[in-house]
Amino acid sequence: MAEAVKKPVKFIKEVSTEMKRVSWPNRKELTKYTIVVSATVIFMAIFFAISDLGISALIRLITG
């Protein structure tokens, strides 16, 4: 029973140690990364929407 308690406690301590080693972005970097990710997501959404419309039109042309 004691072993079952020690493993989670050890895991939490190791996670805490690793989290202290992480280099977190500052506010300026975080803003930059957020803008890049948002722009990429918007671009990909538009790209797939246009692709979907094009493929749908092509299928309608072939089958109709």
Image: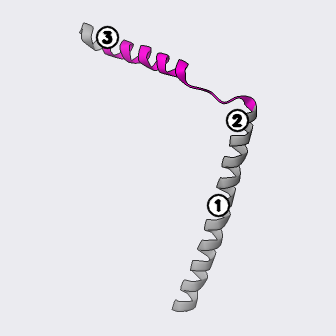
Any magenta on residue 7? Answer: yes
Secondary structure mostly seen in the magenta stretch: helix
* Up/down of 6 relative to 30, above or below: above
Element type at mark 3: helix
Element type at mark 1: helix
**Front disc: 3 or 2:** 2
Q: CA distance from mark 1 to mark 2?
A: 22 Å
Any magenta on residue 53? Answer: no
Q: Which residue is mark 1?
A: 45
Density class for disc 1 (Cα within 10 Å; few <14, some 14-19, many ≥20) is: few
Q: Which residue is rendered at x = 27% and y = 14% of the image?
A: 4
Q: Which residue is rendered at x = 73% and y = 41% of the image?
A: 32
Q: Callout 3, which amino acid? A: Lys
Mark earlier in primary sequence (1, 3): 3
State the mark number for residue 30. 2
Q: Is residue 52 left or right of residue 11?
A: right
Density class for disc 2 (Cα within 10 Å; few <14, some 14-19, many ≥20) is: few
In this picture, which residue range is highlighted in magenta?
5-27
Q: Callout 1, which amino acid? A: Ala
State the mark number for residue 6. 3
User: How far across and down, in percent of the image, does residue 59 sit?
Assistant: 54, 84
Q: Which part of the image, by quadrant, shows the C terminus?
A: bottom right
Q: Is residue 35 left or right of residue 23?
A: right
Q: Quadrant of residue 10?
A: top left
* Up/down of 31 relative to 55, above or below: above
* Up/down of 29 relative to 54, above or below: above
